[in-house]
Image (cartoon, rainbow, N blue to C red):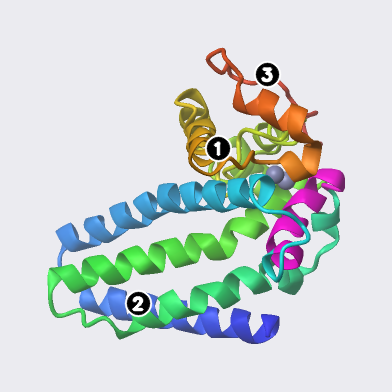
C-alpha cells in the first residue's frame, strides 16, 4: 500500500504539474501559481501542527483504530525521537502519500479553462505536495548528520530546522507542533492557539487533553498556564557540516 501510494501520488502530482504548466498562459497567472504554492506551504505547516497537536493531546493509545495508528506513533516519537531516522523513504512517506491520493485525484480532474479552475488545482497541488514532504522534513530535523544541502535549507529556514523543532521535544511537548517548516510555530504559540482549543474542549466536554498520557495534574497545569508564553530558548547543538 505504501509503495503504491508513493508511486500513485508522484504520478498524479506530475500530471497536475504538467497540466498547470500547459494551462498557464500569462506571466500574471504564473506568478499567481507561484504565490499559491507559497501560501500552500503556510497552510500545510498549519495542518501539520493541527494534526500533530491532535495526536499528542487528544484521545488515547487504546482507542479503536486511531489509538494504534494515530495517537501512539505521535506519543512514541517523544519517547524515542531518533526512531524516525531509522525509517527508510517508503516508511517515512508512504502514509502521507496514501492519504493525499484522494485530493490529488480531485486536483487532476479539475478543468483548467477558467481562472478559478487553475486556482483550485494549484491550491490542491500545493498542499498535497507539501504534505507529501512533511514527514521527510521532520525526519531530516532529527538526523545527526543530514546531507549538506539539507543543512543549507534548514539554516535558511526553508525546511524544519532542528534547533527550532527541538523546542517541541522539550517536556511537556505542548508547543511548536508545526513540523513542515515551523514558520507558524511562534505566532500560534504567542496567540496561545492550541491552548485556547484545549480550553474550549475542556469547558465543553470536561475532557482534559493529555490526561491519559501524563496524568490529570500535569495535564491541568498545562491547560491553566497563566502567563503569556515566552519564546522558548532551547537550542540544540549545531549539526556538523
Ligand atoms: Zn509531539
Ligand atoms: Zn520530532
Residue 195 image point, x, y percent = 54, 31
SS of the residue at dot 1? Answer: helix
Front in this rendered view, residue 237 or 94: 94
Q: Residues within 10 Å of mark 1 (few under 14, many from 20)?
A: some
Label 2 sits on residue:
107
Residue 119 image point, x, y percent = 23, 65
Is residue 32 visible in the rendered structure shown here? yes
Label 3 sits on residue:
233
Label 1 sits on residue:
202
Q: Give the mark nearest the N terminus, 3 or 2.
A: 2
Q: Residue at x 71, y 57 (%)?
A: 71
**Secondary structure character of the magenta stretch overall:** helix
Image: magenta residue range? 67-81
Residue 94 image point, x, y percent = 67, 74
- Does residue 157 show up magenta in the picture? no
SS of the residue at dot 3? Answer: loop
Amino acid at each position: 500500500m505504501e509503495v503504491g501510494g508513493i508511486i500513485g501520488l508522484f504520478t498524479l502530482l506530475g500530471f497536475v504539474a504538467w497540466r498547470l504548466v500547459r494551462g498557464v498562459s500569462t506571466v500574471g497567472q504564473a506568478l499567481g501559481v507561484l504565490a499559491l504554492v507559497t501560501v500552500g506551504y503556510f497552510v500545510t505547516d498549519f495542518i501539520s501542527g493541527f494534526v500533530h497537536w491532535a495526536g499528542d493531546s487528544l484521545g488515547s493509545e487504546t482507542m479503536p483504530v486511531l489509538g494504534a495508528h494515530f495517537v501512539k506513533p505521535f506519543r512514541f516519537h517523544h519517547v524515542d525521537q531518533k526512531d524516525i531516522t531509522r525509517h527508510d523513504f517508503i516508511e517515512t512517506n508512504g502514509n502521507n502519500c496514501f492519504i493525499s491520493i484522494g485530493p490529488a485525484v480531485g486536483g487532476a480532474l479539475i478543468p483548467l479553462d477558467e481562472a478559478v479552475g487553475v486556482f483550485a488545482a494549484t491550491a490542491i497541488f500545493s498542499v498535497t505536495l507539501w504534505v507529501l514532504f512533511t514527514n521527510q522534513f521532520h525526519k531530516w530535523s532529527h538526523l545527526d548528520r543530514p546531507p549538506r544541502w539539507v543543512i543549507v535549507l534548514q539554516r535558511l529556514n526553508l525546511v524544519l530546522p532542528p534547533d527550532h523543532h527541538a523546542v517541541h521535544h522539550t517536556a511537556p511537548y505542548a508547543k511548536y507542533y508545526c513540523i513542515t517548516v515551523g514558520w507558524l510555530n511562534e505566532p500560534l504559540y504567542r496567540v496561545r492557539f492550541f491552548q485556547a482549543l484545549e480550553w474550549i474542549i475542556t469547558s465543553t466536554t470536561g475532557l482534559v487533553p493529555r490526561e491519559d498520557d501524563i496524568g490529570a495534574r500535569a495535564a491541568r497545569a498545562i491547560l491553566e498556564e497563566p502567563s503569556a508564553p515566552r519564546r522558548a530558548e532551547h537550542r540544540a547543538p549545531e549539526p556538523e557540516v
